[in-house]
Image (cartoon, rainbow, N blue to C red):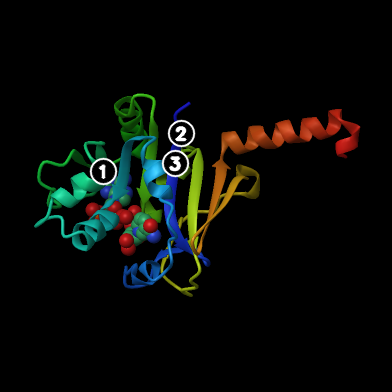
Amino acid sequence: MAKTQYYTATSIDGFTADKSNSLDWLFEVDEGTENPFGEFFEGVGAFAMGARTYEWVLENDNLLDEPQNWHDMYGDVPCWVFTHRDLPPVEDANIFMISGDVRRVHEAMLVAAQGRNVWLAGGGDLVSQFVAHDLLDEIILGIAPAILGDGIPLLRRRVPVDDLILTGVREVGQFAYLTYAVGDVARIGRHLAAEAVTRIPSLR
Ligand SMILES: NC(=O)c1ccc[n+]([C@@H]2O[C@H](COP(=O)([O-])OP(=O)(O)OC[C@H]3O[C@@H](n4cnc5c(N)ncnc54)[C@H](OP(=O)(O)O)[C@@H]3O)[C@@H](O)[C@H]2O)c1
């Protein structure tokens, strides 16, 4: 079944960018030779980002002058950019500028994704709105060996322990990738695990 996933890199202390919206610290980290993002993106049928993330991507990848960089990264996979402003589009990119309730947009994204996954690219401001409406199924974190002390938070709301269950751990270069099921999927997982312990005495 298609999942809605928040895949992002983060510092050990849970910041996706430093105070000045810089990711320079992230690019200093050894990524190894595998390409977890490439593998992940093969399963994505639609994605979304907030205005500040879009502005960062525009600048970092020089997209207004070199729109081909967007196509090289994301092909024709449709992207919804949440904003209240008139942000510049990337030439010929499959981008929809949108504002308002994430629930309505999420429905459109699921249809567009045609059974593939929906990627929430960030930032924490936007993804928190999906969490608030119980629309997030999975978090995949690439944890970089950096402690920033301050910056842009991974999420801007609390997610209770019962709503998260660790489903994957992977080492890639200097990154630790952790995957968590979120919300209903995590609650069902916990329930099934608890039942198994009750039924099989040797697991107690
Ligand atoms: N480490 C990583 O891999 C990674 C990944 C993603 C992001 N980041 C970083 O995170 C930072 C941005 O994160 P952030 O949490 O500050 O911001 P964000 O979620 O990217 O963008 C927030 C902005 O999006 C617009 N927005 C959000 N929800 C909306 C809605 N429902 N309707 C209309 N507009 C809406 C608003 O901008 P306006 O009202 O101004 O239009 C809001 O201020 C950047 O520095 C980025 O580089 C890092």
Residue on which the image places disc 3? 5
Q: Which numbered mark, 2 or 1, is in the foreground of this view?
A: 1
Closer-to-camera residue (39/15): 39
Quadrant containing ligand 1: bottom left
Measure how far apart labels 1 and 3 are at the Cα level.
16 Å
Which amino acid type is shown beneath numbered disc 3? Answer: Gln
Beta carbon of the mark 3 residue lies under 8 A of ligand 1: no
Mark 2 closeness class: few <14, some 14–19, many ≥20 residues within 10 Å: some
Query: Which mark is first along the chain, 1 or 2?
Result: 2
Asked if disc 1 and disc 3 are in contact, CB closer than 8 Å, the reply is no
The answer, for residue 202, to whether it is visible in the render is yes
In 3D space, how far apart are the residues under numbered discs 3 and 2 (Cα atoms)? 6 Å
Residue appearing at x 36%, y 67% in the figure: 27
Label 3 residue SS: strand
Identify the residue shown where x is 27% and y is 58%: 52
Residue 87 placement, left or right of 42: left
Callout 3 touching callout 2 (CB < 8 Å):
yes
Q: Earlier in the sequence, mark 1 or mark 3?
A: 3
> Is residue 152 found left or right of 93 in the rendered image?
right
Left or right of residue 69, residue 27 in this image: right
Beta carbon at label 2 within 8 Å of ligand 1? no
Q: Please, what secondary structure does the residue beneath circle 2 have?
A: loop
Label 1 beta carbon less than 8 Å to ligand 1: no
Horizontal placement of 84 versus 128: left or right? left
* Residue 139 screen position, x and y as percent: 50, 46
The image quadrant of residue 162 is top right
> Picture coordinates of residue 42 (x, y %)?
36, 37
Circle 2 is placed at which residue position? 3
Q: Which mark is residue 74?
A: 1
The residue nearer to you, when weighing 31 against 143, is 31
Given this view, does label 1 or label 3 mark the residue nearer the observer? 1
Q: Secondary structure at mark 1?
A: helix
